[in-house]
Image (spheres, coloured by chain):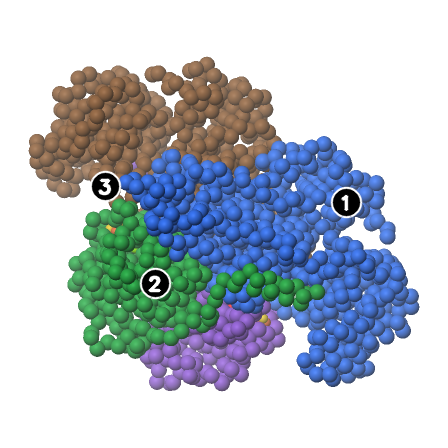
Chain colours: A brown, B blue, C purple, D green
Amino acid sequence: MGSGKNDFVIRIGGEAGEGVQSTGDLAVQVAARAGYYVLTSRVPPAEIKGGLFEYQIRLANAPLYSQGDELDILLAFNEEAYESGIRVLKPDGLLIYDSAEFTPPEGDSFRRVALPLTDIAKTQLKFALGKNVVAVGAVGALFGLPIEFGQRLLQERFGRKGEEIVNKNIAALQAGIDYVKENIPGYEQYQLANAAESRPETIVITGSQAVGLATLASGCRHVFGYPITPASDVLEFLATELPKVGGIVIQAEDELAAMGMVVGAGYSGVKSMTPTSGPGVSLMTELLGLALMAEVPLVLVNVQRAGPSTGMPTRHEQGDLYISVFGGHGEVPRIVLACTTVEDAFYQTLNAFNLAETYQMPVIFLSDTALGTRSEAIPRPDLSQVTIVNRQTLASLGGVNGNGNGHGDFYSFGQEGSEEGGRFKRYNLNSANGVSPMAIPGEAGGEYVATGLEHNEYGRVRYDTTTHKTMTEKRFRKLTAAVEDAPPAYRYGDPTAEVGIITWGSTAGTCTEAVDRLREQGIAVDLIAPKMLWPLPKHQLTPFIEGKKRVLVAEVNYQGQFADLLAARLPGNYERVNIYTGMPFTVAEICEAVTGKAEALAAD
Amino acid sequence: MGSGKNDFVIRIGGEAGEGVQSTGDLAVQVAARAGYYVLTSRVPPAEIKGGLFEYQIRLANAPLYSQGDELDILLAFNEEAYESGIRVLKPDGLLIYDSAEFTPPEGDSFRRVALPLTDIAKTQLKFALGKNVVAVGAVGALFGLPIEFGQRLLQERFGRKGEEIVNKNIAALQAGIDYVKENIPGYEQYQLANAAESRPETIVITGSQAVGLATLASGCRHVFGYPITPASDVLEFLATELPKVGGIVIQAEDELAAMGMVVGAGYSGVKSMTPTSGPGVSLMTELLGLALMAEVPLVLVNVQRAGPSTGMPTRHEQGDLYISVFGGHGEVPRIVLACTTVEDAFYQTLNAFNLAETYQMPVIFLSDTALGTRSEAIPRPDLSQVTIVNRQTLASLGGVNGNGNGHGDFYSFGQEGSEEGGRFKRYNLNSANGVSPMAIPGEAGGEYVATGLEHNEYGRVRYDTTTHKTMTEKRFRKLTAAVEDAPPAYRYGDPTAEVGIITWGSTAGTCTEAVDRLREQGIAVDLIAPKMLWPLPKHQLTPFIEGKKRVLVAEVNYQGQFADLLAARLPGNYERVNIYTGMPFTVAEICEAVTGKAEALAAD
Amino acid sequence: MTAAVVERKAEDFKSEVKVTWCPGCGDFGVLNATYKALAEQGYDTKDVVVVSGIGCSSRFPFFVSTYGFHGVHGRALPIATGIKMSRPELEVVVFGGDGDAFAIGAGHFVHACRRNIDMCYVIMDNAVYGLTKGQYSPTSHVGFVSKTTPTGSSEEGINPLMLAIASGATYVARGFSSKPKDLTKLIVDGINHKGFAVIDCYSPCPTFNKVNTFNYWKDETTPLPAEHDPRDRTAAITMALTDDPLYLGLFYQKEGDSFGDRVGARSTGDAAQTQALVEKLIAKYS
Amino acid sequence: MTAAVVERKAEDFKSEVKVTWCPGCGDFGVLNATYKALAEQGYDTKDVVVVSGIGCSSRFPFFVSTYGFHGVHGRALPIATGIKMSRPELEVVVFGGDGDAFAIGAGHFVHACRRNIDMCYVIMDNAVYGLTKGQYSPTSHVGFVSKTTPTGSSEEGINPLMLAIASGATYVARGFSSKPKDLTKLIVDGINHKGFAVIDCYSPCPTFNKVNTFNYWKDETTPLPAEHDPRDRTAAITMALTDDPLYLGLFYQKEGDSFGDRVGARSTGDAAQTQALVEKLIAKYS
Ligand SMILES: Cc1ncc(C[n+]2csc(CCOP(=O)(O)OP(=O)(O)O)c2C)c(N)n1
Ligand SMILES: Cc1ncc(C[n+]2csc(CCOP(=O)(O)OP(=O)(O)O)c2C)c(N)n1
Ligand code: SF4
Ligand code: SF4
Ligand SMILES: [Mg+2]
Ligand SMILES: [Mg+2]
């Protein structure tokens, strides 16, 4: 392991299904075990089968925030991968290509090394399937990753298949290493600096795995969903894990059914959730309104993809903020959270469940394609630090005073002799934060009917003007209260800077690196990314905005959806910074927005 | 007919199904034929059967803009109607009650007259069913409506049932008239001034009938819908009328199906529409996004009702602006129009179809419960003044130059030898306003596939960054162009006033009367109600706002939905004026918002 | 359900809400039969959840003194599924109209049948849309004149029993609101059936359906012959396809595992169990 | 369709788009059969609209050189209905997967069957979700292991033929993508059938369904016996309920009026006609 550079980006590209994914996964795990920070990004093809699959890995010994704008190394399994990747290979970068597949044209500034992967595997090793492992060996050698981690992983992975297979794979790994050492003079220049000693213990997971883990940790037991890219990852993770703790996952017949089931489960007192993506959210909005009216806690996880309509299912966009905040007919207050990193995905998912239970209302949790599908090495979550909130129920009020129909407790029950004598006031208006204790089916004396029609405190249908007015206010009081519980916003950069960037979701990572890069150029920038997007955490945003000369709002969508929310509710002069290409921002693009000029890449 | 007052409000209230509706309808038609302006409002009960039904009629000999805050006359068929109506009866008003049903308590300032409706009909006339006609006679006598119009109407209505029935009804009418003349001393004070001579020829229709008429007039032939209050009126009107011109109405299995059918019909070259209300819109948002992506012209009529969820189906609210503008995942540009009066409903519906055809995109047309269900006497529409726009098609480009595959026309077709050689460029990017000619199935050489996936100019699926960027921009260019075609905003009041009210939809009428009333109090107010709500017609709003010291935004919803749109896109200092009771604003409430104090009603 | 069998009266299940259906509406019969069925089962009001969609018939939960969920149009079954799957110990009974069940809810109906969750679904079938004041419904006959079909409907009516059997329902019956005793028994048996029970119940709407009236159904219906064996699917199909006469009774019943049985016993998993699993997964990813 | 019968070749219906299905995917067989069927019918590409939803199979329209509509998941039938009802002279053929048809699209399927619009619907049934990479589908069998059912599905698979017959479809057939000749004939007959034609077509997904493979269906299927009479609904039901063997061919056909016939001849009504009607109504309201 060298003492060299501490930040490398490598991209592996090739035909989908040809082992790009497994090569990348293996390399990432080796690196993480060796103690490095890793952050990956995956761009799958549009095609059903075949097409270009690109897997980008960034390695460093300091925390990482974005996938990296440019490549140090491009490992191209075929010509398409070469053509796509070469555009972002650094001028002094290294191109490694499978010479059995194609030969790139001459003439550019970067280094080119032929790696006859197919030949090595087939001819030299007589082990055609070993191609990916040869590639992993080559990558490991370049970065100076300790071979023993690779060997141990192969042992774990193939142990069950017998010693012969393990040995064949280890030989393939060694062949890759050997090839690099013999054929790439000066290969040591790509070696990573030693992994930092003080680095916290990490785990490598994707954003969607983080959501799944937190869902388990929250005590959620019922997940209803309908497959959709890229949210299926969450559904499938939970389908495997939830039953182990007595939970259940049902694949519903469509998203309407999934949301209906979630509403039913939430009503019956059980934490429940549905993971979906854009089209699914559109189908769920009617039932979201029902959950709001009936005051049912639930979590909707939206792993955003590029829209509108079916759009580009495997591409990135932050395009669903409008529907999250404003979707549905009528006025449907709801809480919207977003997460900035894979680690944050874990903690904000927990917050989503807690807020849903506290405020008895739908919480929309926004992840996105970039975050959901990328792996990061994140500090091992400490479950002992996690708070789990459970909802306020009739039981938590002390029940019905033992007589089974609540007589005598005029605060929570209808008074004897009145029309609703003795009935439980499910929607008690006498509540500062709008939250009224909920009876759970099975609780004696709490019998009530949940409904999407306007209703009085007892849940009885009423269309009079006072009821609609006071109940609307009750529902909105919850937002006034909930904003106080907003998780701390992500802050970075120089609080005294005159330029501020407001962003949300995974764009926060790119902006963080932009702040660093701009600082190197002598430009001070401040950054904030709220985790609660709705209700708008003005108490976090106002102090940030104060004193700034320029406030940029960076997001991956066309109209500037968060900028619209800000302008609507927190008047100010916002510069909208948007891209809508199906890809996340590059750090350079953010820098350019700040400086107003195409940025010469920071030499490093 | 007297030469008395020129603005009266009467409310008829009673058990639903007890003839309130028919009494009101008859009275309205008599008044309109007699040459008066009329404007009604109906508040049906929440119950399935029974419950209080209130039918309010305003009569005047000048144009009317709102239903009237207070009553001159309350005709109460039962006690519930009395209790509800008495709260808004003017201190010097007249209460007429069916003394066979109940006796109101003594002691208020208004006049009270017992009208033994049931007795007159049953005992005196031996014609129990004639009760409503007796009531109409009474109302007619009070207002001094010429009896011959009533007689002629009864003749028309009952003629088919034979002379005996007609005569019985005419006797009932006379009995009502006689009762008033004999038992209400000074009844002449309620007599209307003569109908204005110069009044234009009018027709009496509801807002929903106006939408239906304009749908016919637009050339729309295919309507697909699912019943929902209050939009069913539109669906049912067209189910009867459309087949007469070779069109068709299908009641779909749900709103998703209805919208899918509309998209299919729009794709195939035929103007089509769906009428729905809030919950239906929620269910349609996914397909709305498809229509946008595939660039299919269609009209969605939303007769708004009070939400969220099932809410209060028979109550009024302007709560669906968010979903109209922002509903659906991803970024879905669409045009949103609203109408201010019944007459305007006719013309804006025509605009909706024209804009859909021009810009090949979904147009959402907003009506509301108050407007949809109320009748107004409106100037007879002049069809010769109506412009009908049809869409730009391949044929309108001159077809494919006769050779069947478009060779040689490289502007509209793929160049020979290229991947898409000869194929029609359905989504031609080379278009300033984003509109590209559309091929209609059956047109030779125009074969293409419409899709909700991102696609290139030929409609072929592409996920590359350039395609998504340029196609997103193409779709949004349509909005930039469409705003230039915004129908003129409704303007009223004093353009030099320092106080301005911005409003939309039927609230414009209430605001108009508020402007008048405030002027009487010496307060100058200016008023604007744009008909195009999205894209935001800044060119109409900016000059209005300029020079104003205060700008109020009045709308019937909690959050201030239009105020949010304004603030988001046209920075300014907006005072939000909102009610959310399920009822329209009263004129007094608007005045109060302007003056800051509960308004003493203008004596008149 | 392991509710203790206590003596209960139908009245125990009446709520304080005034029933607002039109005089003569068939739904009254279904409501009374349900009160009786619940009483017969000896349930405690706290252990029963009555679920519905939107429609005249769907106002049902308000008239019952148990827990209830009055959902949105067409989604009664998904909501009920969520309740039953997360709280198997509750008794879940679902009510709604023919539009709610077979128009906007058709997809969920098919899947509820094949999923075979242990619930009972009573469709109050009046062959019309009542609440929206008289449009044709999926069970209206060809030629039915309504506000949206002024010259008569052009579509074949759905046969709910056939649809249920084809979709895999394991208890399929037809009731008539004017045969309260038989209906009570069908509901009791449907509740006790292990799996998804479908009861299509003719329930006339005198206000908006002047064709399928009380007299119409009284004349057209007759009980299934005594020798009909509900375990015989072919016979059930034959009887379901017959429309002259329209049979009443239990057409089909198949005993076997419900969805819940297949999924296996579940618990809500305590905090310690949860923590152990999460820790295990964390270890796996490190 | 009144298209002139011209000599056409299957190639005429191939588009320039590269077919991106996995090698061995059954959908290739359906595509080729469709090319042949369209050629056999002698259509002009301009007069045909191929409609689909979302799924591997639903990519179909891109591979055909006619007009097409690749809709959203589950809504192929409503879109096709809109096209056919507004332009009865076009030939509308609909394709999609089992998930598209029977999960998210189940409600529309039932209604398309009873509405009986003159269209042909081919379901490419692989008993799995292909495009989303391997979850179970409504036609998967109990016990099917998939990404969302790691210990096997707990739900009975839907029987598409039974569902179609129960819902009132008037042409109900089963094909197999590896019997291209028979499939071509089924499609041709389905297109020519006056009313809604349903063809459930086994089409293996070698990538995600390792149970219902080419060999599986080859072994399990056999043509309907020659004596089977598709006009006999009871026989059709019996054959559709049989799963050993699984029969291939035309199970059921009922001739009669399609929806279009019932609704009657329609025209787009010229401007003068429109004006006359609107003026008449205006007069009525004055
Ligand atoms: C999404 C949605 N669409 C439409 C409606 C309007 N709606 C309410 S009930 C109903 C149908 C009523 O018919 P049915 O289900 O047969 O019940 P019934 O009133 O006859 O008992 C409709 C269309 C609605 N509430 N929500
Ligand atoms: C509303 C919505 N939900 C979910 C999806 C994701 N999705 C796309 S295709 C599909 C199912 C594919 O299965 P099937 O219809 O059987 O087609 P196949 O790929 O097997 O041919 C799903 C769930 C979507 N595109 N839209
Ligand atoms: S409208 Fe019909 S279904 Fe509704 S309550 Fe009245 S009779 Fe019953
Ligand atoms: S995933 Fe399956 S259905 Fe999709 S193309 Fe591949 S083999 Fe065919
Ligand atoms: Mg009904
Ligand atoms: Mg499939």
Residue C113 position in % (x across, y down): 38, 65
At label 1, the amino acid type is Val
**The numbered mark 2 sits on a residue in which chain?**
D
**Near-viewer residue (A467 or A67):** A67
Q: Is residue B290 visible?
A: no
**The numbered mark 3 sits on a residue in which chain?**
A
Residue identifier under label 3: A17
Q: Kindly identify the residue that appears in the image at 25 percent across and 30 percent down.
A: A82
The image quarter in which residue B191 lies: bottom right
Residue identifier under label 2: D3
Q: Quadrant of the C terminus of chain C?
A: top left
Q: Which of the two discs, 2 and 1, sits closer to the camera? A: 2
Measure the alpha-carbon separation of dots 2 and 1.
64 Å
Residue B8 position in % (x across, y down): 81, 59
Label 3 near ligand 4 (CB < 8 Å):
no
At label 2, the amino acid type is Ala
Same chain under badges 2 and 1? The reply is: no
Q: Kindly identify the residue that appears in the image at 37 percent across and 69 percent down.
A: D195
At label 3, the amino acid type is Gly
Residue C58 position in % (x across, y down): 53, 65
Q: Kindly identify the residue that appears in the image at 43 percent across and 69 percent down.
A: D259
Residue identifier under label 1: B515
Q: Which of the two discs, 3 and 1, sits closer to the camera? A: 1
Q: Is residue B333 visible?
A: yes
Which element carries disc 3, helix, strand or loop?
loop
B121 on left or right of D3 = right
Measure the alpha-carbon separation of dots 2 and 3.
44 Å
The reply to whether the C-beta atoms of the residues labelled 2 and 1 are less than 8 Å apart is no
Residue C202 position in % (x across, y down): 49, 76
Which element carries disc 2, helix, strand or loop?
loop
